[in-house]
Structures are given as structure tokens and as C-alpha cells.
Amino acid sequence: MKLCRFDDNRLGVVEGDMVRDVSAALGCLPTAHYPLPTHDLLIALLPQVREAIEAMNGAGAVRPLSEVRLLSPVANPAKLVAAPVNYRAHIEEVIANEATFTKNHGLKIRETGLFLKANSSLIGAGSPILIHHDDRRTDHEIELAVVIGQTCRDVSADKALAYVAGYAIGLDITIRGPEERSLRKSLDTYSVLGPWLVTADEFGDPTARDLLLTVGDETRQKANTRDLILDVPALIEFASSFYTLHPGDVIFTGTPEGVGPITPGDRIRASITGVGAMDVDVVSG
């Protein structure tokens, strides 16, 4: 199932190039009271939401996807966890470009560890990336994004995929410079998630998935998840050995080689096999 959030927080099921409004299914979610939960309620109760959608038997207004504004498919992640330098060719790219990347950028993932991005940086495919500090280089990074479905800690790799709710395309937008990654990657709009959530049962095995990113007519990044240094199960094992992962937490699995600058006026097209594609505009902030 492909689930999206759109317009004024409507819930939709993506069917080809159309979206069916199934917001009525949200009625199965509990009313939240202060203190609010620190996880995403929809993701935590995704099985119940899916049952409610199926009980609708195809009811719900249908609209073209081109006529709706896509929001992040996860509204309230507790954490955005990101994996740096998780493709071998990207490490080589980093080491070769001393003018852009510092030596620390070339450390292997188990040496440098994971990092967190601010939740306030999260947007969906229907919103533009706002370039801040335009005196500095800002880069695109396409990544397979993994959405955690159940609370877990110290999960072994062989059991990790059982804790996944679904997958999406992630764009980890980055200002280059000497500061810590979490600062340079946490500006407003610098985490894009979309265009929708593909549930784990529909997506299947996350290995051997093609990634493609173009800017205008130029192909910038083209790779396959088979080349990840730490694959999805290993990343969940690694992350959960440090953090308790909660429903709705998002793991950005790392970007391949080909990262490059973006400027206002650009349009990014990002696609991943089994998810789909999204177009995101770049404008001045």
C-alpha cells in the first residue's frame, strides 16, 4: 500500500496517478492529550489504520496526484537518524575533493557514527527547498529512507526488517563547511521525505534498489542500494544499539556518489525503484 498525506493533513492511498482520500480511516486513532506522545500515532497504529481503509471498500473521493500538495508521509517523527558516507564510491568522492569536504567527512560509517537531523527540517515533496546562506555551497543527497514501525532497542540485523513500517525517498540537503553535520543539515526544508510511504509488505527486500537523482536534464546521482556499506538491517541494528527507535522514526540510509550543488531555480527529480519519483523545486530562502 502507498500512503500519502496531502493538502490539509488528509490521508490518501496512491493508486497509479490518482489519490483516494481515506481520511475517514483516521477515526481509529485515539485522541491525544497533553503530554502528547513522542512518536507518530499513525505509524504506531498503522495495522489498524490499514484495516479501517480496507473496510471502506474503495470509498473516498479520488483526485489526480498532480492536483494535490504532498506533505511528508510521516507527520511527527521523534528522530531523523542519518548515516554518513555509507557508499564506498561516495567515500572515494569525498577523499578526492579536499576543497569541499574535510578529512572527517571521509571517515567510514562505523568510525564517524550516525547523526541526527532536526525534525523542524522535515518537509514533503509538495514544498520547495529554501536555500539559506546562499554565499555557501548547498548540495543534494538522495537516500533510501526507512520508517520504523515499532518501538525497538538492541535489535539484531536478522530481525530488523520486522520493525520497519515502510520506505520513502529521502533528500538530505546539506550546506558544506566545517561545522557539525547536524547543524549544516538541519536547516528548515533540508530534509525531504516522500512522495509517499510504501508499506514494508509492498516494498519487499530493500536490497538492490536503483536510486536516481537529476537536476534539470543533468543526471547527478545513479546508484543501487546493493552498494551500501551497512545495509538496512545492519543500520537498524547499529542505530538501535545507541537509540531506542520509536514508531515514525526515520533512518536516512546514506547517499551515493555524485552529490552536487543546487541553487534557486533548480528542480530536483528523485526516484527509487519500488517507491516512485518526486519533483522538488529549489527556491531562495
Image (cartoon, grey):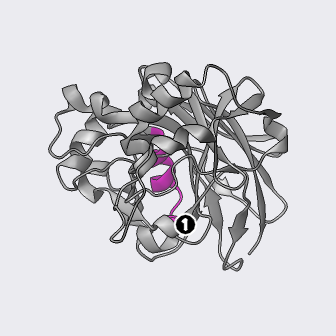
- In depth, the one of 197 and 258 nearer the eye is 197
> Residue at the spot x=78%, y=27% of the render?
17
| Residue topped by disc 1 | 121
- The answer to whether residue 56 is magenta is no
> Residue at the spot x=33%, y=71% of the render?
35
Question: Is residue 56 shown left or right of residue 215?
Answer: left
Q: Image quarter for residue 269?
A: top right
101 vs 193: above or below: below
Q: Image quarter for residue 33?
A: bottom left
Where residue 116 appears, as percent x and y from the top left, is: 38, 63
> Residue at the spot x=25%, y=45% of the render?
151
- In depth, the one of 1 and 237 nearer the eye is 1
Where residue 26 appears, as percent x and y from the top left, is: 53, 43
The amino acid beneath tag 1 is Ser
48 vs 141: above or below: above
Q: What is the span of residues highlighted in magenta in the rendered image?
A: 89-101
- Residue 231 in sight in this render: no
Please rate how many residues cluster around mark 1, counting C-alpha atoms within 10 Å: few if below 14, some from 14 to 19, many from 20.
some
Question: Is residue 238 shown left or right of residue 40?
Answer: left
- In depth, the one of 175 and 150 nearer the eye is 150
- Residue 49 in sight in this render: yes
Where residue 272 appears, as percent x and y from the top left, is: 60, 31
